[in-house]
Amino acid sequence: MKTIIHKANTRGHANHGWLDSFHTFSFGSYYQADRVHFGALRVLNDDTVAGGMGFGVHPHDNMEIISIPTSGDLEHQDSMGNTQVIRQGDVQVMSAGTGIQHSEKNKNHDQPVEFFQIWVIPNQKNVEPRYDQQHFQIQKNIIVCSPLYLPLDPMIPVFKSTRKPGSVWENWIKIDRPSIN
């Protein structure tokens, strides 16, 4: 397997006041031809949203969207009727499939919410939209994820297809936010 390292200081950056976002791959106004995606991994954003602020209702389709808060509380609402708050230790998975509308906002007005947002190109288009959320034990910035059902591409090395239409994440995901000191 090929190893590619993108150091934190080489990422794209956009600060909109209420949203401070670092982009590992081309996203929004940040474009780099050699960093559009990595296999099925399309987006890996490190976002900070100011208190009480967020993304209004907007559409997605044919994308697997994963949100992982590292601090604060992120409120999710969608057109399937889900209203949930995700916190540190939670992993949220939304399969946009044939189309979904959702919003995300910082549940707290007095502190920012920090989270990773990950988009994965699906291995099958136009599936029925799905939502799942699970909480995992945290050990020194490591979220232990075993097992987590994700509707992702079974060809990604860390995933093993175990049921239709989902798959099981059998490995741990290490979330190591760079320290700013």
Image (cartoon, rainbow, N blue to C red):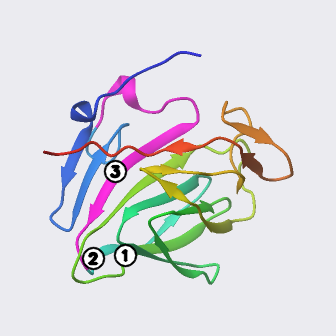
Q: Quadrant of residue 17?
A: bottom left
Task: Report the side of 177 relative to 141 (left or right).
Answer: left
Which residue appears at 33% of the width and 46% of the height? 177
Say few, some or many: other residues with alpha carbon within 10 Å of mark 1 (under 14 / 14 to 19 / 20 or more). Answer: many
Residue holding disc 1: 105
**Callout 2: helix, strand or loop?**
loop
Mark 3 or 1, nearer chain start: 3
Judge by depth and name the residue closer to the eye, 130 or 86.
Answer: 86
Three-letter amino acid code at disc 2? Met
Which residue appears at 53% of the width and 72% of the height? 101
Which residue appears at 50% of the width and 30% of the height? 38
Say the numbered circle drawn on residue 23.
Answer: none
Say few, some or many: other residues with alpha carbon within 10 Å of mark 2 (under 14 / 14 to 19 / 20 or more). Answer: some
Give the distance between the C-alpha atoms of the residues marked 1 and 2, in whole angstroms.
6 Å
Residue 42 in the image, given as x and y percentages of width and height: 49, 40
Judge by depth and name the residue closer to the eye, 135 or 97.
Answer: 135
Task: Report the span colored magenta.
Answer: 31-51
Residue 116 in the image, given as x and y percentages of width and height: 41, 54
**Callout 3: helix, strand or loop?**
strand
Three-letter amino acid code at disc 1? Lys
Residue holding disc 2: 53
Q: Are marks 1 and 2 in contact (CB under 8 Å)?
A: yes
Give the distance between the C-alpha atoms of the residues marked 3 and 2, in whole angstroms.
16 Å
Three-letter amino acid code at disc 3? Asp
Is-magenta flag for residue 69? no
Say the numbered circle drawn on residue 46.
Answer: 3
**Callout 1: helix, strand or loop?**
strand
